């Protein structure tokens, strides 16, 4: 159990366009979802935390107007990279926690590799 | 500030044992996680420690000392597939996960 999916698994887009990444909890209701970014050979960097039905909490230095997060239901969160630029090319990973009893273990999606040309 | 330290890279031999250390200084403590991440893939959960002591799970064990702000992940009978990055993460007083930079483990035949 506790499976998280992401779509797409990889995407190539042109500079200036927007890209939407979906994160779904397949067999549980996710009380909280997290979005991470990871550049090559670096550790995970938390971008934002979102709870269903409320605005996401962004980490310092992450532009909320550029990285739009929508957590519309207990099983779906989306990250939209608006006006993408080559420096946004990265590995984007979502995770989710399912509440009691495994309140704080984060279940990770497989990640989405974004390349902006 | 909050800080988690772990070695950047370690090398070990197939069949041997390796210990990956993690020290932390965080605002509060609600548990420590170890995750494994293969290159190009998302992290997968290995262990969770909230009480002092050793937790054993097959070839992998994780130890915690809260008074010392210290944990280690012990991998026995190393296999080539264990080559990966190992991430230490601490749940702080706000139940936010603070991540270490990860330890890249290289297994040699």
Image: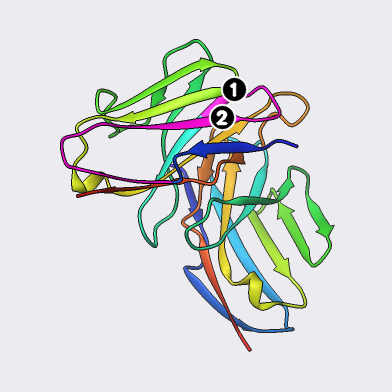
Residue that protrudes farthest toward the bottom in the picture: B109
Q: Secondary structure at mark 2?
A: strand
Cα separation between marks 1 and 2 = 5 Å
The location of residue A108, given as percent across then percent down, is 58, 42
Quick check: A77 above or below A14?
above
Residue B15 x %, y %: 74, 84
Q: Chain of mark 2?
A: A
Is residue B4 part of the magenta span, yes or no? no
Q: Which residue is mark 2?
A: A24
Mark positioned earlier in the residue sequence (1 or 2): 2
Numbered badge on residue A75 = 1
For residue A47, side relative to residue A97 (left or right): left
* Chain ID at mark 1: A
Is the N terminus of chain A in the top left, top right, bottom left or bottom right quadrant?
top right
Tell me the crowding category of disc 1: few under 14, some 14 to 19, or many 20 or more residues within 10 angstroms, Cα based: many
Is residue A5 visible to the viewer in this orientation of the structure?
yes
The part of the chain drawn in magenta is A10-33
Q: Quadrant of residue A101?
A: top right
Q: Is residue B62 left or right of residue A30?
A: right
- Asked whether, in this view, residue A116 is left or right of residue A107, the answer is left
In the rendered image, residue B29, in percent from the top left (x then y), is placed at: 63, 38
Q: Confirm or deny contact between disc 1 and disc 2 (CB under 8 A).
A: yes
A18 vs A117: above or below: above
Asked whether A34 or B4 is in front, the reply is: A34
Which label sits on residue B101? none
The residue lying furthest to the left in this view is: A16
């Amino acid at each position: 159990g506790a499976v998280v999916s992401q779509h797409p698994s990889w995407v190539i887009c042109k500079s200036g366009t927007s890209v939407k990444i979906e994160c779904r909890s397949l067999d549980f209701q996710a009380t909280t979802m997290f979005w991470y970014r990871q550049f090559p050979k670096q550790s995970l960097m938390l971008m934002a935390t979102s709870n269903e039905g409320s605005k996401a909490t962004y980490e310092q230095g992450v532009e909320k107007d550029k990285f739009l997060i929508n957590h519309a239901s207990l099983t779906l969160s989306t990250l939209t990279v608006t006006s993408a630029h080559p420096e946004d090319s990265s590995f984007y990973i979502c995770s989710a926690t399912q509440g009691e009893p495994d309140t704080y273990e984060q279940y990770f999606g497989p990640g989405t590799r974004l390349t902006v040309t | 500030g909050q800080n988690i330290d772990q070695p950047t890279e370690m090398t070990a031999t197939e069949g041997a044992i390796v210990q990956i250390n993690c020290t932390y200084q965080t605002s509060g403590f609600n548990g420590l996680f170890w995750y494994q991440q293969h290159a190009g893939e998302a992290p997968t959960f290995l262990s969770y420690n909230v009480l002092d002591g050793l937790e054993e799970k097959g070839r992998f064990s994780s130890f915690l000392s809260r008074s010392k702000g210290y944990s280690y992940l012990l991998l026995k009978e190393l296999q080539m597939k264990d080559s990966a990055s190992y991430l230490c993460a601490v749940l702080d007083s706000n139940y936010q996960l603070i991540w270490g930079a990860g330890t890249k483990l290289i297994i040699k035949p």
